[in-house]
Amino acid sequence: MAVSDHVDLNGFMEGVKKRNPYQPEFVQAVQEVAEDIFEFMEDKEEYHSQQILRRIAEPDRVVSFRVCWEDDAGNIRVQRGWRVQNNNAIGPYKGGIRFHPSVNESVLKFLAFEQTFKNALTGLPMGGGKGGSNFNPKGKSVREIMRFCQSFMTELYRHIGADVDVPAGDIGVGAREIGFMFGQYKRITNNFTGVLTGKGLEWGGSLIRTEATGYGAVYFLAEMLATKGEDLAGKTAVISGSGNVATHAAEKIVQLGGKVLTLSDSGGFIHDPDGITQEKIDWVKSHKTHRRGRIEDYVAAFPKATFHAGKTPWGVPCDVALPCATQNELLGEDAKTLIANGCRAVSEGANMPTDLDGVHAFKAAKILYAPGKASNAGGVAVSGLEMSQNSERRSWKEEELQQMLKDIMSGIHQSCIRYGDQGGGYIDYVKGANIAGFKKVADAMLAFGVV
């Protein structure tokens, strides 16, 4: 028996921390998964002897590179770019590209690690990866963003491919940025292949990709409520964020008869006690997308709402909550406040938006709580469907894609129940998602031997 066969959870995490100093986000992501996986692996000798979790928690490779570009004033600017290819046991690496000042190696490693399990849950053949840069697109001209994207792709192109690694968009990277990067990829390689997802409909994109993450999070929320014989009609919802995921989650909740009370951005949150209707959601989409405005401007357009600067919306009483902004935005005390105010269900639209204290609080209270790797998998699921459409040189109709998205989210929900049912009517969705995702990846790794 190998010396490290049955190292305990604490010993395993000490090793992770030692190998990844100054990377708190990555360590947190591994801890959250390991807490559930160690119990599952207890009587499974092959996972221990083959060091499966240790191998998944060590990326296949981390590519770091310099990105030089010229701003409109003729100044040479230097940023850093990364691509983290975490695991390709079940398919090509798949995960977004993020442009934001907060991007660093720890953040991208945590996102790629989470993506590995999220992609496995979809049932589609996709491995886990993530990439990005500390470039901040806010305040930049369109031509500056174009030049940066072209320079970024000039390095990235050699590390990706339709059967190797297929990036998508993420924070700071929308259809415009994908277009600039795809154009540069095509220019360098002379290939028109499905190497990026989130493309425009005219050149290989998929219908409903824009809506998929937000809609999927609400579909998953509806599946959870249905286990209690409930639906979203008449429910009040608190949502953080005001970007693509948040606005489409709000849209779907309104369509299903719910009442959305809040949206937010980095400056604070707005609370609209009358409810954020479809008309108001459309205003937010236009204001944030086309005018690059702030959420606080909502109050001028809709005076009955209030803006709360520098705060998150978790103190507003609600039936359901959807954190859709960024990692670690919902802390332990926030989770306790939501629970005390009667919140019955939480569906994460962002990646790891709840810190470990918050996760533990939700689990202890036994409320309906869906981790992002399960509830926000709709976006990457439709990205996977875009890959399939690109391979077949065809496009599916919106009705077909909507049904596929619902079916995929329902399938993820069933997987979570299979491994997370604790009896007594309580489903631990965190445990269910972690185990279901891990098992699929782990079994594929066992089949390949030590590679």
Image (tube, rainbow, N blue to C red):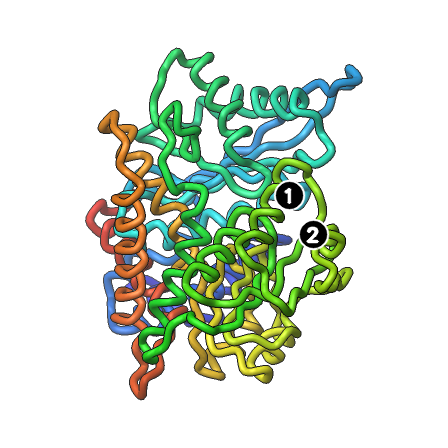
Residue 199, image quadrant: top left
Name the residue carrying label 2: 295
Q: Secondary structure at mark 2?
A: helix
Q: Residues within 10 Å of mark 1 (few under 14, many from 20)?
A: some
Which residue sits at x=38%, y=70%?
A: 429
The N terminus: image quadrant = bottom left
User: Which mark is first along the chain, 2 or 1?
Assistant: 1
Q: CA distance from mark 1 to mark 2?
A: 8 Å
- Asked if 327 appears above or below 97 in the picture, the reply is below
* Quadrant of the image containing the C terminus: top left
Q: Residue at x 32, y 65 (%)?
A: 435
Task: Give x and y (percent) for residue 334.
Answer: 63, 73
Image coordinates of residue 56 in percent, x first then y, are 38, 52
Question: CB under 8 Å between callouts 1 and 2?
Answer: yes
Q: Position of residue 261 (x, y in %)?
A: 60, 66
Q: Nearer the viewer, residue 404 or 44?
A: 404
Mark 1 belongs to which amino acid?
Lys
Within 10 angstroms of label 2, few (less than 14), some, or many (20 or more) residues?
Answer: many
Name the disc covering residue 187, or none.
none
* Residue extending farthest left: 447
Secondary structure under tag 1 reads helix
Image point (45%, 42%), residue name: 210
Residue sitting farthest toward the bottom:
424
Q: Quadrant of residue 285?
A: top right
Q: Nearer the viewer, residue 318 or 367?
A: 318
Image height check: is 39 above or below 291? below
Is residue 71 shown left or right of residue 9?
A: right
Q: In this view of the protein, can residue 106 be seen by the observer?
A: no
Residue corresponding to mark 1: 288
Q: Amino acid at mark 2?
A: Ile
